[in-house]
Image (cartoon, grey):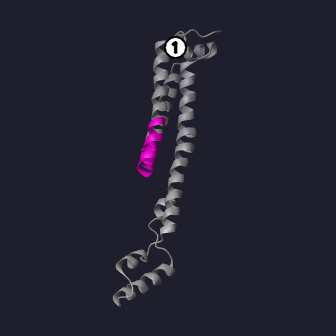
Amino acid sequence: ELAVQERWRIPGQRNILGATKAREDYEYGKVSLEDINKSQIHDWDYEEKNEAETRNHFFRILLQKVVLGNLLSLWLQSAFLAHPPKEVLLLRERMGVSDVKIFVSMILSAIQAVLRCKKVCVQLGLFGLFVSSFLMLFVAWSFFKVYKAYQCKESGWELSGCDPIPF
């Protein structure tokens, strides 16, 4: 995020003196207008490096915060709700609130993932949109898994449908 703010920093004195000299040379007819534009207070190499760092930062946000922080926990929570062993089924019968708590936690993780993906899409453009859409499919898959698991109350849910849980 600092790299995003850093793009508005004015480079050092070296460029300011060079830009002033180029404007004076233009007034005396020594340089063209193109040369003036090249010598403006702008460090092209620094800007390219800064843009690369910004892209890397937002890609790391996708990998670290969204995938590891949100989607992994979402997957574990949906697996807990979708494939409970016999002991967990008995515990869930005694404590009906646990399902609600896990589902609320899943919703909050999904909201965080959506907001972070939206932020990254703005910064990374088409690449961010592509990666974020893949991650949003994973979010939808987790909720679909829980939905299908509740249709198969006495068994677990797999891609093939309701499968009996071996005990």
Q: Tell which residue pokes out farthest to the bottom in this image.
A: 28
Q: Position of residue 39 (x, y in %)?
A: 43, 77
The structure residue drawn at horizontal position 57% and vertical position 34%, both measured from the top left corner, is 72
Q: Nearer the viewer, residue 91 or 31?
A: 31
Q: Quadrant of the C terminus?
A: top right
In the rendered structure, which amino acid carries the disc numbered 1? Ser
Residue occupied by mark 1: 160
The structure residue drawn at horizontal position 48% and vertical position 16%, both measured from the top left corner, is 150
Relative to 159, does residue 134 appear above or below in the rendering? below
Q: Nearer the viewer, residue 55 or 62?
A: 55
Relative to 126, does residue 25 appear above or below in the rendering? below
Which residues make up the magenta segment?
A: 116-134
Q: Looking at the magenta stretch, what is its main secondary structure?
A: helix
Q: Position of residue 154 (x, y in %)?
A: 53, 9
Is residue 47 found left or right of 164 in the rendered image? left
Q: Secondary structure at mark 1?
A: loop
Q: Position of residue 148 (x, y in %)?
A: 47, 17
